[in-house]
Image (cartoon, coloured by chain):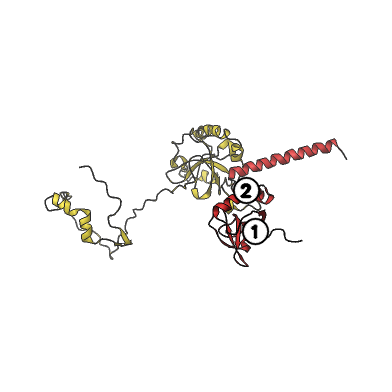
Amino acid sequence: MAPSKPRSKSRNPLLIPGIGKFSRSKMYHKRGIWALKAKHGGTFPRHDPKPAAPEPASKKPPKFYPADDVKTPVPNRRKPKPAKLRASITPGTVLILLAGRFMGKRVVFLKQLPSGLLLITGPFTVNGVPLRRVNQAYVIATSTKVDISGVNVDKFDDKYFAKDKKKAYKKSESSFFETEKQEKKLPQQKKDDQKAVDTPLIKAIEAVEYLRGYLGTKFTLRSGTKPHELQF
Amino acid sequence: MPFKRYVEIGRVALVNYGKEYGRLVVIVDVIDQNRALVDAPDMIRGQINFKRLSLTDIKIDIPRVPKKKTLIEAMETADVKNKWEKSSWGRKLIVQKRRAALNDFDRYKVMVAKIKRGRAIREKLAKLKRENPA
């Protein structure tokens, strides 16, 4: 027999949360337990019990008994899901950044990373925004879309953007007084990645009139504009 | 300064408040001191307070409470739609609607166009000033 899929919808409609329409006996009949039993000669089919793990031969009494009985906390099985992407944000959408270093800039959305953050790029030569992660909540999605088919963003994930761990601070008298200024140079790999993503993107942008200037301009509010009445 | 636009049967009015805001309707009957019966081709005939109506210059020739078909024919012969869209009031409303529907990219393009236009005007003005020092 084909492996049976777990049934998605319950056969017992809820009248009120906690109260089903059908009684236990009715549900027994509905689920067909009687048919399964009949098929397997009067009993519900059961797996053979798993052989119990053999108890360790010598079990010494514990050295320490805690004074009070402390309840063990229930383990947390919660796995946070990545934030649901707004329907208005699709690959290639022009977004307006609302906070942070690049506040007001219009950027191109590439993809959503596993952490839920959005991967964006300026492109860098157009408005100075590099490949960057941004939270959906701090973004306005416009209805303008850029053709992103020529761009390959598969290699970017959250690990790419992880900060380098600082080297362990070695306590020595000389280094205590000389504050070491670590030069933070952008590795060539990142520059190449930026270029690889931006070149096909810029070609797509140049194809649309005014789009390059649009992406280079910041979003501003002026006297009289009502943000709640603006269509993006 | 007498009145020019009267409430009469056949007067076209604009609804300025309520669910039907912005719709052009025709007054087909007067109910009492405050209310009129209004009708439009794509609307169910209903009553509305005069305070919710702004009268327009357009009037059509209809009997009191005409059938919908008669109303539509009368509106076609009087060419209400075109008259309205050509009138300055109608044109202003159309522009307002267009402006409200602009998206962010459109607004940018409008801004660029305004700057270009202003620049062209100023250049021309400067040229004329140079040529005709007065």
- Dot 1 alpha-carbon crowd within 10 angstroms: few under 14, some 14 to 19, many 20 or more: some
Label 1 secondary element = strand
* Res A94 quadrant in image: top right
Q: Residue at 20% across / 53% down in the picture?
A: A32
Task: Tell me the residue at 66%/58% (across/down).
Answer: B55
Q: What element carries label 2?
A: helix
Judge from the rendering whether residue B60 lies leftward or rightward of residue B45; answer left or right: right
- Of residue A79 and residue A60, the one placed in the foreground of this image is A79
Residue type, label 1: Ser
Residue A114, by quadrant, is: top left
Residue under the image location 58 percent in, 33 percent down: A206
Quote the CA–CA distance across marks 2 and 1: 23 Å
Mark 2 vs mark 1, foreground winner is: 2
In the rendered structure, the answer to whether residue B119 lies left or right of residue A173 reads right
Question: What crowding class fits label 2: few (fewer than 14 Cα within 10 Å), some (14-19), or many (20 or more)?
Answer: few
Give the image location of residue A43, x and y in percent: 13, 53
Q: Where is residue A229 in the image (x, y as percent from the top left)?
A: 58, 53
Type of amino acid at the residue the image marks with label 2: Thr
Residue B77 is labelled as: 2
Q: Chain B is drawn in which colour?
A: red
Rendered hue of chain A is yellow
In-front residue for pair A192/B114? B114
Which dot marks residue B54? 1
Residue A82 seen from this side: yes
| Vertical arrangement, residue A78 with respect to residue B127, above or below | below
Tell which subunit mark 1 falls on.
B
